[in-house]
């Protein structure tokens, strides 16, 4: 029978099927960070259990690490305790951890692909909803809760129910200035933040295949914002080329058989999808979110929508509340809205390609006078080093950006990087919820190029028209 | 997880409806990195007269003498008698952690919030649903009989009290099995260890680079 990519990933990991319709699913890789793991480790200790397979786990601190003045350590005691606890737990149980001083440290979802710890055809979990990122490799990757982190540590398995299959096709050629971030925002704008609920999404079509691995990760990263726990993209040559030679990738001796195995991880012709959605690439313009949900997104040339035009009463109310929170009015041109802060980073957009895109825009220019802070936070120590090798840090610093140490930073404001009430931020992260980047802060989700352009212009602006 | 067969203990009556998880363990304690040690802060806002924060020495705090958990006659209670909709509010697992850490093993109420009810089993707690009239009888018995104990027999699904009185309760047989055997979800999965090992052996041949 013809199978989808998701079916293949699922079937190849079922250890046993339970009577109640759930399955015991084998997990190849677990990523661990400091926020969702402490109680899982304590649970192991209380029950006197050991990790089932040590080598399946990889840990790093990211949410709470400072992005400046690292030599002073972590000042906030709660943050420090969480990071210290991760270090202790990893040392105690023997789990590989890239600690704060390690050049390989960074955001979990950035470092794992970078190390080749994320591989095609595997199952991968982490106590973090943006684990969907790793689906870009033709892997089944999803976020889990702390009890499940403990469950995976102890058994290498999870009890799961299979989701339905959804395919989202984006065909045609992407317009100039349109990035993976714009594509995923446009998709979420179309299907809504609950559009993918209950489904595993496969992103397909030639516009998707034309994306680099960095772009594909940006796309899969935000599958969760579309309501799906997992988003994925079929394995192709781009995937294989990216993986080759990385520290945790298969060695020379196993490489060919691995590639052979991986190539099958795509949907068969005629495989059944419960739902298919299609977008035309040429319809997608650079996106800016205007509200407090990722589905509240418009093209850079558009006007802020009017709640009065909305017939659904609940939606209308939601739109008005979002406008009030964001300090915006219906009918305003989004490209005239001034910005206070620019944040380029997060597991959505902190990879080398993102930093190159920002530096390309910033080269020889100056951050506008109304911008209070323009942060660039690379996703890992290695990306930072690579960017510095390419001189991107110099370009960005000369333009007036700040160049920081790797971590989640202003994506969720658990460390010192955060917005002040009512500050407006052009952010390359993935969530524009109320207060996400700091209490009262106003987040507009954009691509790295758009964020850099907003920093230079002082407001949102069309990139290729500059 | 500790096996649960039979418990004979004093029950403490908490005579309020809609006791939510924030009352069971207030949110400032969620920053903790542990799953044990919440016992001293169980019902923190009701038990103490001052405001509790993580890291405080609870032994020096001002106790609320009126709160039932602080009354000498209910010291060492292992059973909590409660009212309708116990455990409503957020899904935090810290609530059963706090109850368990305090020493509670059984909660009896006319109804429970759904997620809390599920979370109890994950942590070795037995939530028992009884008709309101029977819960009233138990409240009466406890309040009238200082030192009077209840016996909860999970095997027989019975509660004995007052020498001759007996109540039966319903329970999902799978959950009953898990509690009797001391199996948490992890323990259950580990019952299939052989299947997991067999899967790994098979996969080693197919995807050796993952092992
Ligand atoms: S960068 Fe943001 S979304 Fe990604 S893992 Fe960190 S906090 Fe979560």
Image (cartoon, helix red, strand yellow):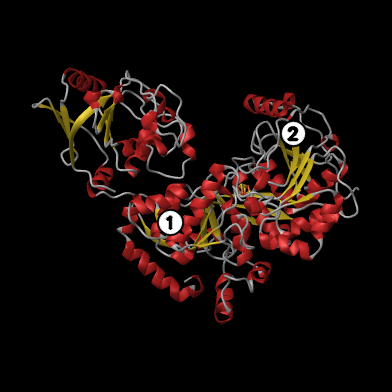
Q: Secondary structure at mark 1?
A: helix
Q: Residue furthest left?
A: B164
Tell me the chain of label 2: A
Residue drawn 90% across the image and 50% down it: A365
Look at 59% across and 42% down and name the residue there: A76
Q: What is the tally of numbered marks visible in this picture?
A: 2
Residue A374, quarter of picture: top right
The image shows residue A287 at horizontal and vertical percentages of 77, 44
Quick one: A114 or B12, which is closer to the camera? B12
Which residue is depicted at the point 58% across and 45% down? A196
Q: Which is nearer the N-term, disc 2 or disc 1?
A: 1
- Tell me if residue B64 comes above or below residue A193 in the rendering: above
Is there any visible trace of residue B71 in the rendered image?
A: yes
Residue located beneath label 2 in the image? A423
- Picture layout, residue A311 above or below residue A252: above
Secondary structure under the numbered disc 2 in the rendered image: loop
Visible in this render: residue A161? no
Name the residue carrying label 1: A152
Q: Position of residue A21 (x, y in %)?
A: 38, 51
Q: Nearer the viewer, mark 2 or mark 1?
A: 2
């Amino acid at each position: 029978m013809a199978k989808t990519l998701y079916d293949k990933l699922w079937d190849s990991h079922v250890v046993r099927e339970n009577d109640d319709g759930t399955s015991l699913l084998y997990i190849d890789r677990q990523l661990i960070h400091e926020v969702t793991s402490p109680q899982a480790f304590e649970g192991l200790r209380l029950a006197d259990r050991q990790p089932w397979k040590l080598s399946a786990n990889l840990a790093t601190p990211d949410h709470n690490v400072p992005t400046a003045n690292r030599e002073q350590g972590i000042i906030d005691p709660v943050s420090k305790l969480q990071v210290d606890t991760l270090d202790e737990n990893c040392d105690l149980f023997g789990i590989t951890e890239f600690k704060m001083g390690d050049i390989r440290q960074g955001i979990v979802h950035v470092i794992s692909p970078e190390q080749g710890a994320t591989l095609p055809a595997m199952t991968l979990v982490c106590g973090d909803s943006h684990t969907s990122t790793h689906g870009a490799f033709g892997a089944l990757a999803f976020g889990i809760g702390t009890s499940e982190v403990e469950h995976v540590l102890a058994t290498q398995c999870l009890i799961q129910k299979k989701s339905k299959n959804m395919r989202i096709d984006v065909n045609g050629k992407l317009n100039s200035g349109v990035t993976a971030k714009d594509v995923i925002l446009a998709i979420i704008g179309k299907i809504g933040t609950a559009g993918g609920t209950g489904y595993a999404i496969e992103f397909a079509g030639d516009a998707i295949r034309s994306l680099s691995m960095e772009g594909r990760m940006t796309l899969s990263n935000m599958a969760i914002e579309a309501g799906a726990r997992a988003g994925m993209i079929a394995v192709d040559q781009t995937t294989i080329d990216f993986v080759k030679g990385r520290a945790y990738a298969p060695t020379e001796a196993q490489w060919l058989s691995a590639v052979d195995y991986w190539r099958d991880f795509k949907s068969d012709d005629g495989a059944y999808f419960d739902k298919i959605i299609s977008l035309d690439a040429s319809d997608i313009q650079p996106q800016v979110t205007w509200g407090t949900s990722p589905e509240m997104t418009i093209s850079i040339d558009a006007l802020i929508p009017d709640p009065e035009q909305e017939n659904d009463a609940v939606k209308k109310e939601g739109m008005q509340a979002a406008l009030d929170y964001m300090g915006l009015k219906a009918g305003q041109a989004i490209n005239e809205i001034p910005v206070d802060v620019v944040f380029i980073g997060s597991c959505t957009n902190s990879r080398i390609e993102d930093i190159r895109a920002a530096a390309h825009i910033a080269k020889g220019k100056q951050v506008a006078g109304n911008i209070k802070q323009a942060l660039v936070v690379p996703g890992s120590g290695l990306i930072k080093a690579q960017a510095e090798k390419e001189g991107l840090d110099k370009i960005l610093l000369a333009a007036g950006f700040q160049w920081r140490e790797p971590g989640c930073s202003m994506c969720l404001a658990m460390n010192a990087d955060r917005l002040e009430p009512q500050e407006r931020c052009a952010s390359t992260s993935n969530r524009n919820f109320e207060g996400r980047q700091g209490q009262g802060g106003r987040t507009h989700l954009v691509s790295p190029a758009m964020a850099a352009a907003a920093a230079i212009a002082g407001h949102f602006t069309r990139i290729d028209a500059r | 997880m500790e096996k649960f067969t039979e418990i004979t203990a004093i029950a403490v009556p908490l005579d309020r409806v809609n006791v939510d998880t924030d009352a069971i363990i207030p949110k400032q304690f969620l920053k903790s990195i542990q799953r044990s040690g919440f016992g001293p802060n169980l019902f923190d806002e009701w038990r103490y007269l001052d405001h509790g924060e993580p890291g405080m020495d609870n032994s020096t705090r001002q106790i609320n003498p009126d709160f039932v958990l602080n009354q000498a006659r209910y010291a060492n209670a292992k059973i909590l008698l409660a009212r309708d909709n116990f455990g409503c509010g957020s899904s935090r697992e810290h609530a059963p952690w706090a109850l368990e850490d305090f020493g509670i093993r059984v909660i009896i109420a006319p109804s429970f919030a759904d997620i809390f009810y599920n979370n109890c089993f994950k942590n070795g707690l037995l939530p028992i649903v009884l008709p309101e009239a029977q819960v009233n009888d138990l409240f009466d018995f406890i309040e009238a009989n200082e030192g009077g104990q209840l016996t909860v027999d999970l095997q027989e699904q019975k509660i004995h009290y007052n020498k001759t009185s007996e109540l039966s309760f319903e329970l999902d047989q799978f959950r009953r099995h898990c509690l009797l055997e001391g199996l948490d979800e992890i323990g259950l999965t580990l019952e299939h260890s052989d299947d997991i090992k067999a899967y790994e052996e098979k996969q080693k041949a197919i995807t050796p680079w993952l092992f």
